[in-house]
Amino acid sequence: MITLKFSRLSLALGIALLPLAHAQAETKTSSFQVGMAVTASCAINATNLSFSSMPTGTTSTSDASTDISVSCSQGTPYQIGLSQGNNFSGGRRLASGGSFVNYELYSDPSRSNAWTSTQVVSFTGNGSAQSHTIFGRIPAGQSVPTTGSYADTIVATISY
């Protein structure tokens, strides 16, 4: 008889536990993306351009050059434009008080391609610093009666 009671007890427990065995917790899943946008960046650094000293009188041709350093992200196209300067009047001018000396800036060593804000020079970034030379020229034949320090300020602008 004990066996029978045990069987009934096992059967009763088995029936009682049957809903728990089949009532497993349900799970659902969802996925999502993880990402970020990498934007292009550029930096520009210009150094001063200095022409040689000249005596008063009539100018002779004076050439000088300087470099602009640009660091742009790999593969980023960019353009460099140069402002007309603070003393512009029909052309770029160095000023000392009310006296002026005309000059120009170029993108090539033969000084045939003017470099302005509208005549920009285009390049592509390589992820490292790239040097670009600006070639300056004071044309011969200008009258310079006044001594002093002549200067102008050019703004180099990078667009990318």
Image: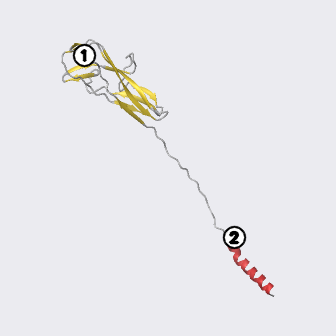
Does 27 sit left or right of 108 as displayed?
Answer: right
Tell which of 70 and 13 is nearer to you.
70
Compared with 109, 73 (above or below) is below
Does 123 sit left or right of 152 as displayed?
Answer: right
Question: For the residue labelled by badge 2, is the local secondary structure a helix, a strand or a loop?
Answer: helix
Image mark count: 2
Q: Residues within 10 Å of mark 1 (few under 14, many from 20)?
A: few
Picture quarter containing residue 29?
bottom right
Q: Residues within 10 Å of mark 2 (few under 14, many from 20)?
A: few
Amino acid carrying mark 1 in the image: Met
Circle on res. 22: 2
Circle on res. 54: 1
Question: For the residue labelled by badge 1, is the local secondary structure a helix, a strand or a loop?
Answer: loop
Quarter in which the C terminus is drawn: top left
Colour scheme shown: secondary structure
CA gap, disc 1 and disc 2 = 100 Å
Residue under the image location 41 percent in, 27 percent down: 131
Amino acid carrying mark 2 in the image: His
Residue under the image location 39 percent in, 18 percent down: 109
State which tag comes first along the sequence, 1 or 2: 2
**Image x and y of residue 7, in percent:** 78, 82
Picture quarter containing residue 81?
top left
**Image x and y of residue 134, in percent:** 37, 23
Does 106 sit left or right of 40 as displayed?
Answer: left
Picture quarter containing residue 90?
top left
